[in-house]
Amino acid sequence: QVQLVESGGRLVQAGGSLRLSCAASGRILNTSVMGWFRQAPGKEREFVASISWSGGNTDYAGSMKGRCTISRDNAKNTMYLQMNSLNSEDTAVYFCAAKSVIWGRYDYWGQGTQVTVSS
């Protein structure tokens, strides 16, 4: 099994920045791509960004391009999401997830961390 724990979510003013972290433990070698997702109140969970195992390949949702950077430190088993120029539409619970090597899907999920942007 793989355990994922997010941290860093908090209340931030519009225009501000925030860095989220996702600490992984367990059978980490069973994972490949890791990603961030978010779910706003009354909305479905949506993709934010993803990063390959090596960190060489990244992908971002259109709404986040230019405003966030995903990274990972495999030596620390930690993934990060740096978000800038936050606005009220970024208010959501942010989840980190990891794809299993075997199935190629996001099988492992964290519990989420709340990000609230005040206008």
Image: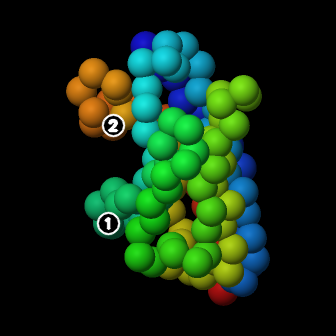
Q: Where in the figure is residue 69, as x and y percent of width and height?
A: 62, 62
96 sits to left or right of 100? right
Q: Is residue 82 left or right of residue 31?
A: right
Question: Residue visible at 68% across and 80% down?
Answer: 85
In this rendering, does residue 82 appear at all?
Answer: yes
Bin the neighbour count of mark 2 within 10 Å (Cα to Cα): few under 14, some 14-19, many 20 and up: some
* Vertical side of 43 occupied by 62: above or below: below
Asked if residue 115 lies left or right of residue 39, the reply is: right
Q: Position of residue 107 (x, y in %)?
A: 32, 30
Q: State the quadrant of the C terminus.
A: bottom right
Look at the image and tell me whether residue 95 can be seen: no
- Is 12 rendered above or below residue 55? below
The kind of residue on which mark 1 rests is Lys
Query: Callout 1 environment at 10 Å: few (<14), some (14 to 19), or many (20+)?
Result: few
Tell me the residue at 41%/76% (across/down): 62
Residue 30 horizontal/vertical position (percent): 42, 18
Q: Which residue is mark 2?
A: 106
| Residue holding disc 1 | 43
Residue 114 location, quadrant: bottom right
Residue 97 appears left or right of 119:
left
The colour scheme used to paint the residues is rainbow
How far is mark 2 from mark 1, CA to CA? 19 Å
Residue found at x 69% / y 37%:
73
Tell me the quarter of the image containing the N terminus.
top left
**Considering depth in this image, is 17 or 79 the residue closer to the camera?**
79
Q: Amino acid at mark 2?
A: Tyr
